[in-house]
């Protein structure tokens, strides 16, 4: 189906939905069940975008209990009376306008399928169990049900209050696709892949363009986030180890930690807007003694990001800015896991905005990416993305993304346009 017809059909469908559905006060699952709050208590415009209360809830280890949910209390015991769970799914259709039909590698096969029109049903299917373990201990577990069943992610924040406005946390975690930022992240800039405004991650977030989720480098990440948090911001240090595939059934890991550092400032509200800005740093060398694999894993990248969330008149508006830089690999050195080019640094900056035409229901978005792949010379990889998001109820969302690419390299095989229609649900 031609791109214009896809966009027209999506727009007409969203217009029909806008006039046909009544907004419901259905809360997001798991944490909403535990706290008794509607999703708008923690989220800006829609899930998963966090507002200040949502940041505080997450920073305090998911331990707040309220509403009708009681707790089981005893000496050194305080757990919810019910184990709170949810099923989270994402169904997706993608279409590119390229000519490639080869399938020699998984990447080529994916591009070829998208050129023909690709359904991913489901793209994600997660059994999500989370909440309170004790007064100052929480947890989040994500069990992947799409394809091979596995533990897609798990973390257990141990929170230590120091003052009324300062807490320290220790958060051990594992993740199969989010990278070291999975341990602790509160912004909506794509600093962690899950927390972003638009489905097209690499087109709208510099961090995701650099590949900081590490999902293409191996089989996951293990680490411990050490966090100091207050209402004015937070600082975290995360030693982490990426896992790499060895064969169909096994992985191996380096035997020394790499380092991830995150700092964020969240000043007092300015006018109608909640502001935040921060930096990220990935560094280190990690060795392994496995005879079949390289003896050194090297990481060298940094990023800056900022966001403003509030209202332009009566309309909710989110603005998100990012910049990322992955150093080139030194001649004769071990490849940087974020940039294996020996020629130039891999860089990107993005600016994105998301405007709520009908608050918490219908939003229009746009983003621009200026990027360089690190190949040197003619290596520009720029993109413009347009988005429409519609939420008939607060725990179901439809989003249409349309990206237009302008590369120095030829785009005949993968195409210069990419359309994605996604349905997200959680219950």
Image (spheres, rainbow, N blue to C red):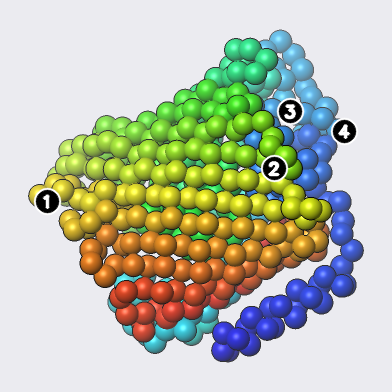
Q: Upstream in the sequence, badge 3 or badge 2?
A: 3
Residue drawn at x 71%, y 78% as measured from the top left: 11
Tell me, for residue 64, which label it has, or none.
3
Q: Alpha-carbon distance for marks 4 and 2?
A: 33 Å
Left or right: residue 330 compared with residue 23: left
Residue drawn at x 24%, y 64% as measured from the top left: 375
Q: Position of residue 210 (x, y in %)?
A: 38, 54
Of the two numbered discs 3 and 4 in the rendering, the one whose residue sits closer to the viewer: 3
Give residue 185's quadrant in the image.
Answer: top right
Left or right: residue 37 compared with residue 355: right
Residue drawn at x 41%, y 67% as measured from the top left: 382
Residue drawn at x 47%, y 25% as measured from the top left: 226
Of the two numbered discs 4 and 2 in the rendering, the one whose residue sits closer to the viewer: 2
Q: Name the residue under label 4.
A: 68
Contact? badges 2 and 1 (CB < 8 Å) = no
Q: Alpha-carbon distance for marks 1 and 4?
A: 62 Å
Residue 156 in view of the camera: no
Q: Upstream in the sequence, badge 1 or badge 4?
A: 4
Left or right: residue 292 compared with residue 282: left
Q: Alpha-carbon distance for marks 2 and 1?
A: 46 Å
Local crowd at mark 1 within 10 Å, few (<14), some, or many (≥20)?
A: few
Q: Where is residue 350 in the image (x, y as percent from the top left)?
A: 48, 57
Q: Upstream in the sequence, badge 4 or badge 2?
A: 4
**At numbered mark 2, what does the secondary structure look like: helix, strand or loop?**
strand
Q: Upstream in the sequence, badge 1 or badge 3?
A: 3
Contact? badges 3 and 4 (CB < 8 Å) = no
Local crowd at mark 3 within 10 Å, few (<14), some, or many (≥20)?
A: some
Q: Name the residue under label 2.
A: 273
Local crowd at mark 4 within 10 Å, few (<14), some, or many (≥20)?
A: few
**At numbered mark 4, what does the secondary structure look like: helix, strand or loop?**
loop
Q: Alpha-carbon distance for marks 3 and 2?
A: 26 Å
Tell me, for residue 331, which label it has, or none.
1
């Amino acid at each position: 189906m031609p791109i214009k017809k896809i966009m027209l059909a999506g727009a007409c469908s969203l217009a029909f939905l806008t006039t046909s559905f009544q907004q419901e006060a259905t809360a997001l699952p798991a944490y909403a069940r535990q706290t008794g709050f509607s999703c708008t208590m923690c989220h800006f415009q829609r899930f998963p975008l966090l507002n200040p209360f949502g940041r505080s809830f997450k920073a305090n280890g998911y331990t707040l209990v309220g509403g009708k949910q009681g707790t089981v209390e005893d000496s050194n015991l305080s757990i919810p009376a019910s184990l709170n769970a949810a099923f989270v799914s994402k169904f997706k259709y993608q279409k590119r306008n390229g000519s490639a039909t080869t399938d020699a590698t998984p990447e080529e096969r994916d591009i070829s399928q998208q050129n023909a029109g690709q359904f991913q049903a489901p793209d994600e299917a997660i059994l999500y169990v989370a909440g309170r373990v004790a007064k100052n201990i929480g947890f989040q577990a994500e069990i992947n049900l799409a394809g091979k069943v596995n533990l897609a992610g798990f973390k257990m924040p141990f929170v230590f209050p120091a003052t009324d406005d300062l807490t320290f946390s220790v958060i051990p975690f594992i993740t199969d696709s989010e990278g070291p930022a999975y341990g602790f992240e509160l912004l909506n800039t794509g600093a962690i892949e899950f927390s972003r405004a638009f489905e097209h991650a690499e087109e709208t977030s510099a961090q995701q363009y650099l590949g900081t989720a590490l999902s293409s480098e191996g089989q996951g990440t293990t680490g411990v986030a050490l966090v100091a948090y207050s209402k004015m911001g937070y600082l975290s240090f995360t030693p982490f180890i990426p896992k790499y595939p060895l064969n169909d059934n096994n992985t191996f890991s380096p035997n020394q930690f790499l380092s991830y550092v995150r700092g964020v400032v969240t000043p007092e509200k300015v006018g109608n807007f909640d502001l935040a800005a921060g930096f990220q740093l990935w560094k280190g060398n990690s060795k392994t003694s496995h005879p079949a694999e390289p003896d050194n894993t090297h990481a060298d990248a940094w990023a800056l990001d900022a966001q403003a969330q509030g209202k332009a008149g009566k309309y909710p508006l989110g603005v998100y800015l990012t910049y990322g830089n992955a150093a080139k690999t030194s001649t004769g050195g071990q490849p940087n896991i974020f940039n294996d080019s020996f020629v130039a640094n891999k860089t990107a900056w993005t600016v994105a905005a998301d405007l709520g035409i009908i608050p918490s229901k219908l939003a229009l978005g746009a983003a621009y990416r200026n990027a360089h792949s690190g190949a040197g010379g003619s290596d520009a990889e720029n993109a413009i993305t347009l988005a429409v998001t519609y939420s008939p109820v607060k725990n179901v969302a439809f989003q249409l993304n349309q990206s237009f690419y302008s590369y120095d390299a030829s785009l005949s095989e993968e195409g210069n346009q990419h359309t994605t229609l996604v349905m997200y649900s959680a219950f």
